[in-house]
Image: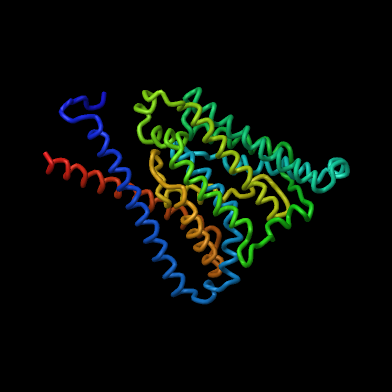
Amino acid sequence: MADTTPSHPAPTSKRPGLQARLNEEFLAEVVLYGIAAIVLALIAMRLGGAFFNATNLVSVLEQVPEFALFSLAMAIAMITGGIDLSVIAVADLSAIFAAYIMTNPSIVDALGPGGAIALATVVALGASVLMGLFNGIIIARFGVPALVTTLGTMLLYFGLASGLTGGVGITGMPSAFTDILMLKLGPIPVSFCGLAVLFVLASFYIRNSLFGKTLYLYGDNKVAALFTGLPINRAIIISYALSGLLAGAAGLIMLARFNSMKVGFGDTFLLQAILVAVLAGMDPYGGRGRLLNVLAAVLLLQCVENAFTIEGLSPYAKKMIWGGLLLIFMALNFFVRRIVRRSLTRAALRAG
């Protein structure tokens, strides 16, 4: 049972928790943007104009969309104190559905290239939502931990994708589909502009809507959330459906970028998406973090990835660095929380 000492009124008892959350989020943002400033300064000293030129910076923006969508999906799951390890498998399987439709001569002849693209998009996004719903129902209705659930469905979806393709890639998408990523608004890719708008709207909605507040409350204090009467289970199910939808959209972008789809495409994004969410200040235990910071963290890591490429760094070395960075950021978040809680405890003791 929580402390039931009646010496303080209810509103006052809620303030330390809220204050701790706000302080932790503020310090997490200081860490994020401080690291960004240091990293960009190091890149400038090391690479200079080889990195900071218009062509390369536009290239960074072009490579961001699918990475950002995976990271946003992961961040939404983390708000509830969960995780979604199935995002890459959802993306691959839904994109394979789309690829089969767009490369099927009968469908293309019947609907035309535009109709086939529209049908493929609807099927892919619909399938990804259903896969996300499946995750959410298992987690919310049956109480299976998100880690176990999404690990199991990851293997399931990868298995289905392997069975459908036999491990062989599907190629030859219509040019009208692959050319979508080439559209630009001035020098800025249209895909990045749409992504920025999505992050602003998602951040505002999750932060201010009843749905979003329910997710934060559940992540912050699961026991208290269950006694509020809020539709907790429904919110969790919807959150994983949204995660699936975002993964499906990322899969379509990968399909357009590579003009092909094969099981395992994008598998390196899983660790990076978790890394981005932690770097952005999302608490793995739930209830913390701002989605808009996820986009900043994505841009930072994409800059680092691009710098690694310019330096000719080995892919194996990159994985080692990503893993090391994840451990460092987890440790930083732990110390930030401990500093905030100690300072609030001391302040409460001084106040009597």
Figure quadrant of residue 193: bottom right
Q: Is residue 81 visible?
A: no
The colour scheme used here is rainbow
- Whether residue 184 appears in this view of the structure is yes
Q: How many numbered markers are drawn?
A: 0
Residue that appears at 73% across and 57% down = 179
Specify the quadrant that holds the N terminus: top left
Q: Is residue 97 left or right of residue 145?
A: right
Find residue 111 and report its horizontal and vertical position in percent.
84, 42
Q: Residue at x 70, y 48 (%)?
A: 261
User: Is the C terminus in the top left, top right, bottom left or bottom right quadrant?
Assistant: top left
Residue drawn at the location 75% of the way across and 44% of the way down? 118
In the rendered view, would you say 173 is above or below 209? Answer: below
Quarter assignment of residue 249: top right
Instruction: Please name whichever residue, 276 or 234, is drawn nearer the observer in this view of the structure.
Output: 234
Question: Which residue lies at the image location 41% right of the left edge and 37% below the top edge?
Answer: 216
Specify whether 151 is left or right of 222. Answer: right
Question: Which x, y percent locates residue 220?
Answer: 36, 36
- Measured as percent of width and height from the top left, residue 7 is found at 15, 28
Residue 310 in the image: x percent, y percent? 55, 69
Using the image as rendered, state which of residue 278 and residue 156 is in the foreground.
278
Query: Does residue 17 lie above or below 311 as drawn?
Result: above
Q: As rendered, which of 298 and 265 lies closer to the eye?
A: 298
